[in-house]
Image (cartoon, coloured by chain):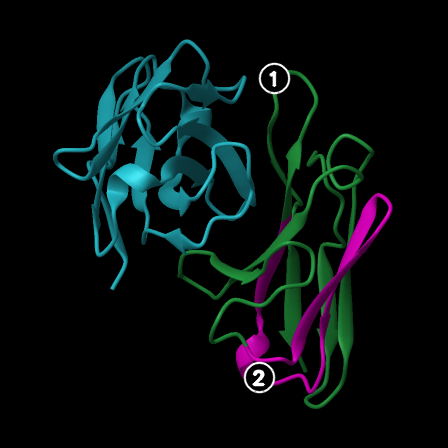
Chain colours: A green, B cyan
Amino acid sequence: QSVLTQPPSASGTPGQRVTISCSGSSSNIGSNTVNWYQQLPGTAPKLLIYSNNQRPSGVPDRFSGSKSGTSASLAISGLQSEDEADYYCAAWDDSLNGHVVFGGGTKLTVL
Amino acid sequence: EVQLVESGGGLVQPGGSLRLSCAASGFTFSGYAMHWVRQAPGKGLEYVSVISSNGGSTYYANSVKGRFTISRDNSKNTLYLQMGSLRAEDTAVYYCARALLVWTSEFDYWGQGTLVTVSS
């Protein structure tokens, strides 16, 4: 059971807009920034969104992030076949001695 | 170009030990905290451990505390994870990842991972 809650799956057709949610608590998302990772099949995770809504250099502006309270969302517009991947949210958690928590991951299928 | 290359994975019996390495290049290694994250086959990401840039601070997930030791050699640009008393549930791909801070979930570069299989 992951500390951050994501839907296990999401899907869309090419060109559509899809969103993936990430729900946490006051000790993680509520008090720290959220980062999103994209993991293509058979590869290492890649930083997709940092500090809630910032895109690293090279990440298309089709990807966007937002945060409100203890929840965050990743939106992908103009869905493309190469976006088919697993997506993970992550945040620092202030409980105990502090640690990183991940969502369980969302498998995005492009139909 | 930033590169992180893990090595040292393999098949080990339950109760055994293994040392993973992560060789860094293309950046000032001593300026970054380094983290280990693992992923069991077909499962999600699990945070394992972190070490500060100078090695003075470390943290371990409860699942590995007392069994794993993280360390680094800044003169060799290398991160290590000494794994002991290994269990079947430690079977995973182990990734090293770079971050500016210890207290962050923002990992801007990841290695390709090394597979550890704990089985008799």
Residue plotted at (41% across, 20% down): B58
Closest to the camera, between mark 2 and mark 1, is: 1
Q: Label 2, on which residue?
A: A81
Task: Tell me the amino acid under the disc marked 1.
Answer: Asn
Magenta stretch bounds: A60-89
Q: Nearer the viewer, residue B12 or B7?
A: B7
Pick out the residue farthest to the right: A69
At mark 2, the secondary structure is helix
Q: Quadrant of the C terminus of chain A?
A: bottom right
Judged left or right of residue B84, residue A74 is right
Question: Residue B74: percent from the left, percent from the top?
Answer: 19, 33
Chain ID of residue with mark 2:
A
- Mark number, residue A44: none
Which residue is at 51% across, 34% downward?
B47
Amino acid type, callout 2: Ser
Residue placed furthest toward the left = B76
Label annotation for residue A97: 1
Residue B76 rendering spot, x and y as whole percentages:
12, 36
Going from the N terminus, do you reach mark 2 or mark 1 first?
2
